[in-house]
Each structure stands twice: as structure tokens, then as C-alpha cells.
Image (cartoon, rainbow, N blue to C red):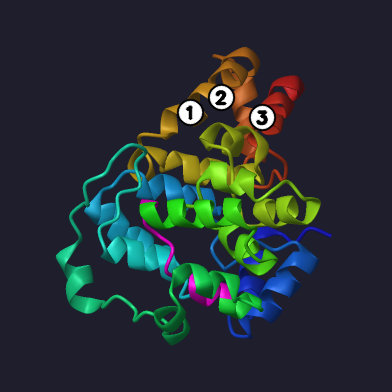
């Protein structure tokens, strides 16, 4: 049974109070996304790809304490936009109020790749992968995995990260359990998939309504995906828009299905 958005957030908040491995197992069993936020993980990545210091400060507040690598990347000025190499400016308030977390003892002692290979639990894998956040780190991980496959715990911890390069996620392999975890983590191919295939429609449209502020570079992909449906099934028909306005707050399926339903009823 799919939990509604409100109860999902409530349960997610309480799950944040127990052991992280137990919480992940429960979320996987009941179909809840990771963390209390309703934002799919990929939306956070699209925001980071703006490489805007002010927006990054907002993103950091949205991240959970478990998102160590992304929090560290923001503090370190890592650029997320494809093709951008120079470090970006970091909000001075973040630099003043937050220190980068220390390198875990096990990773400092063994080195990154040996620590990844020695990870015998999800806790150890998360500890080691918290040091993977720069482009060169991802390249090192990819080369190590091609040389000799990394442990399943490590691949699992990395594949559900929004900043995991799609090519590396594909390199880890397409297994049903991995695919399920990736979907549950809210990893999406792009804003077009989010706009047309994600639900419920009220949540998706609420996020997209802020897209020009949150991820303006990627927002046109969502608009282009929805525009033909809106023009064909709603257009200038006032009665169709009236039906959509009546349904939009409680519609549980996707935005395209909302548009098609409103158009058909009208």
C-alpha cells in the first residue's frame, strides 16, 4: 500500500531517529523514499548544478546528516555543472558556521580504495564513500571497480547518490535490486522524466513551480515535456482548466494523467 505524502513525511521523520541501516531496510520494505524530504534526490542534484553559492547554502539545509559527501562537497566549493572545472565560491556563512568533517580513521589509515574494498557492512561502505565527492574521486572509484569489482555494499551506497555519474551507475550493473533502490532513492534520468513519470502530480507541480528559481538551467526540459500535453488537452478551454483546478490538490497519479483526465472530463 502506498503511503500518502503527509504520512510518508511523518514516518520518514520518525525513521530518522533509529539506526540508519534499520531505517533503510524499513524504507525499502514499505516503499518510502530515503529521508523525510519529499524532494527526489535528483532534484537536489539539479539545484547543485546551478553552481550558485546562495542556492548551495539552501541545498545544504535540505540535506540530511547522512548526506556527508554532498555536504562536504558544498563546503569545498565543488562544481556540479557538467563540464565546469574551477571551484565555485562558498557562502561565507557556511564557511564560518560549518567545518568540513574529519577524514574517518579507517580511511585515513588504509587509503580510499583499500577502505572501499575492505568495507564489510553498509556502515563501513557509507563511511568510506563519504570521501567520494570530487570528479577525480569518482574517476578513481570507476577505475578501481573496472580493475576488480568493488563490494556490493560500496556499489549500493554509491549508486543511490544523486551525484553518482550515470556511466558509473551503469558500470555497477543493472540488477533488479539495484534498480529498485535507485528508484526508491529518487534518482531520475532528468527533469522530463520527473515531470511526466513521477507522482503524485500536486507534489511534482509544486516543485516545478519553483523550478525557475531552484534549477533554471534544467527547467526547460520539464516544460518541453509537458507543453504538448497541456496545449493539446487543455489549451484555451476554460472548462478544462476549471476541472484541473478542482482536481489538482488531491490527484494521486502523474501530471500527464491529470492533464488528460481534466481534458477528457471537460
Instruction: Please check the rendered image and state whether residue 74 is part of the magenta-colored stretch, yes or no.
Output: no
- x, y percent for residue 59: 37, 59
Q: Are marks 3 and 1 in contact (CB under 8 Å)?
A: no
Report the disc number at residue 221: 1
Instruction: Report helix, strand or loop for mark 1.
Output: helix
Q: CA distance from mark 1 to mark 2?
A: 6 Å
Q: Residue at x 44, y 49 (%)?
A: 45
For residue 20, say whether it is visible.
yes
Report the disc number at residue 256: 3
Instruction: Report helix, strand or loop for mark 3.
Output: helix
Q: Residues within 10 Å of mark 1 (few under 14, many from 20)?
A: some
Q: Earlier in the sequence, mark 3 or mark 1?
A: 1
Q: CA distance from mark 3 to mark 1?
A: 15 Å
Q: Are marks 1 and 2 in contact (CB under 8 Å)?
A: yes
Identify the residue under disc 2.
225
Which residue range is magenta in the image? Answer: 125-135
Q: Quadrant of residue 99?
A: bottom left
Q: Quadrant of the C terminus?
A: top right
Q: Of 175 and 99, which appears nearest the observer?
A: 175
Q: Of 121 and 112, which appears nearest the observer?
A: 112
Q: Quadrant of residue 195?
A: top right
Q: Residues within 10 Å of mark 3 (few under 14, many from 20)?
A: many
Q: Residue at x 55, y 43 (%)?
A: 166
Above or below for 113 versus 213: below
- x, y percent for residue 215: 38, 41
Amino acid at each position: 500500500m502506498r503511503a500518502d505524502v503527509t504520512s510518508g513525511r511523518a514516518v520518514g521523520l520518525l525513521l530518522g531517529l533509529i539506526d540508519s541501516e534499520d531505517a533503510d531496510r524499513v524504507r525499502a520494505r514499505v516503499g518510502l523514499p530515503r529521508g523525510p524530504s519529499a524532494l527526489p534526490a535528483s532534484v537536489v542534484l539539479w539545484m547543485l548544478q546551478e553552481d550558485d553559492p546562495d542556492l548551495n547554502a539552501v541545498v545544504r539545509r535540505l540535506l540530511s546528516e547522512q548526506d556527508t559527501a554532498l555536504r562536504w562537497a558544498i563546503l569545498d566549493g565543488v562544481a556540479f555543472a557538467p563540464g565546469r572545472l574551477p571551484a565555485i565560491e562558498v557562502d561565507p556563512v557556511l564557511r564560518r558556521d560549518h567545518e568540513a568533517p574529519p577524514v574517518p580513521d579507517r580511511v585515513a589509515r588504509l587509503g580510499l580504495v583499500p577502505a572501499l574494498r575492505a568495507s564489510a557492512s553498509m556502515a563501513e561502505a557509507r563511511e568510506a564513500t563519504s570521501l567520494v565527492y570530487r570528479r577525480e574521486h569518482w574517476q578513481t572509484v570507476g577505475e578501481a571497480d573496472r580493475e576488480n569489482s568493488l563490494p556490493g555494499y560500496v556499489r549500493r551506497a554509491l549508486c543511490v547518490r544523486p551525484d553518482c555519474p550515470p556511466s558509473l551507475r551503469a558500470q555497477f550493473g543493472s540488477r533488479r535490486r539495484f534498480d529498485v533502490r535507485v528508484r526508491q532513492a529518487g534518482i531520475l534520468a532528468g527533469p522530463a522524466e520527473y515531470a511526466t513519470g513521477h507522482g503524485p502530480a500536486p507534489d511534482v507541480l509544486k516543485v516545478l513551480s519553483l523550478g525557475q528559481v531552484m534549477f533554471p538551467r534544467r527547467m526547460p526540459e520539464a516544460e518541453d515535456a509537458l507543453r504538448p500535453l497541456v496545449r493539446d488537452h487543455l489549451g484555451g478551454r476554460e472548462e478544462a482548466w476549471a476541472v484541473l483546478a478542482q482536481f489538482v490538490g488531491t490527484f494521486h497519479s502523474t501530471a500527464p494523467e491529470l492533464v488528460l483526465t481534466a481534458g477528457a472530463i471537460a
